[in-house]
Image (spheres, grey):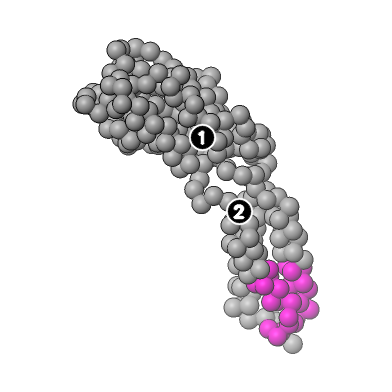
Amino acid sequence: MKGPGLPTLAANAGSLALLLWLYLGDLLDAARAQQAEVAALTAPPQTGWAWAVLTLALAAAAVAAFGLLRGKGPDFRGYRLLPIVVLVALFVDLFVVTSTRSALGSADRMELALARLGGQANTLAAATGQVPSAEALRPYLAELGDPPYLVHGQPAKGGFSLQTRQGCNGPVSEAPGAPLGTFVYCIAEGQKAAWLTVVALPAAERFGSPALLSRDGKPITLSVQPADLPPPPDAPPPGAAAPK
């Protein structure tokens, strides 16, 4: 009896490769997240689901290999198992697993938190004619929840914090030693301008130690100034990220 045709072999090989890429990737991410100080993942990978899919995939691959070794023709039902596992796994991922996760990644959500705090700061600055103090901003930190990252494989806890620096001429370029979720509030002389940055991970990195949220090597910054004053020199306009 002739063996399966090339399309059947390609469908099985492609299905197995896709499953290994997707679900071995989840297991590797989980292992790396456990070892890394900070991981740019909004929730721990679903390792139990990944193991279940991989177990089914290997069992289906074994059945297909049995049919191939026995010279089973294309009508052998064992050749259909791997494509079926792919369809079921992707369906569950799309409509069950993924539906419980945020559509935005860690860096995007952290940038939104920065924009939200910067918006509150600019509102206070417009009302008082000078940038707000750190004490005026701290009550808004609780509204931001927890940083959207994992710390040693577990969701970050403890919320955000605010670190103040005085006499600044512009935003900070680094914040060594500052923990994840620290807003660095850099205030110019006379409280006429300020800049906000936040400690997370560079947007291009998925695992590592806490560092300023940045893109293309440049910290993402929000400027704060009273509405009746021009934007501070060498700083982005209110509500905008640092230039790329």
Label 1: few (<14), some or many (≥20) within 10 Å? few
Residue furthest bottom in the image: 1
Q: Quadrant of the C terminus?
A: top left
Q: Which residues are magenta?
A: 60-85
Query: Which residue is identified by label 1?
Result: 143
Q: Earlier in the sequence, mark 2 or mark 1?
A: 2
Q: Could you tell me how far apart the alpha carbons at marks 2 and 1 are, in whole angstroms?
A: 21 Å
Residue located 31% across and 16% down the image: 191
**Left/right of residue 16 with respect to residue 198 in the rendered view:** right
Amino acid carrying mark 2 in the image: Thr
Q: Main secondary structure of the magenta part?
A: helix
Residue located 67% across and 51% down the image: 46
**Left/right of residue 13 with respect to residue 56 in the rendered view:** left
Magenta span includes 75: yes
Q: Quadrant of the N terminus?
A: bottom right
Magenta span includes 108: no
Residue located 48% across and 41% down the image: 109
Residue located 50% across and 45% down the image: 105
Q: Which corner quadrant of the image does residue 166 belong to? A: top left
- Residue 37, given in percent of the width and then of the height, sits at 61, 30
**Left/right of residue 217 with respect to residue 74 in the rendered view:** left
Above or below for 79 versus 42: below
Above or below for 3 versus 156: below
- Residue 30, given in percent of the width and then of the height, sits at 66, 44
Query: Which residue is identified by label 2?
Result: 100
Q: Residue 169 or 20: which is nearer the viewer?
A: 169
Disc 1 on helix, strand or loop? helix
Q: Residue 163 or 124: which is nearer the viewer?
A: 124
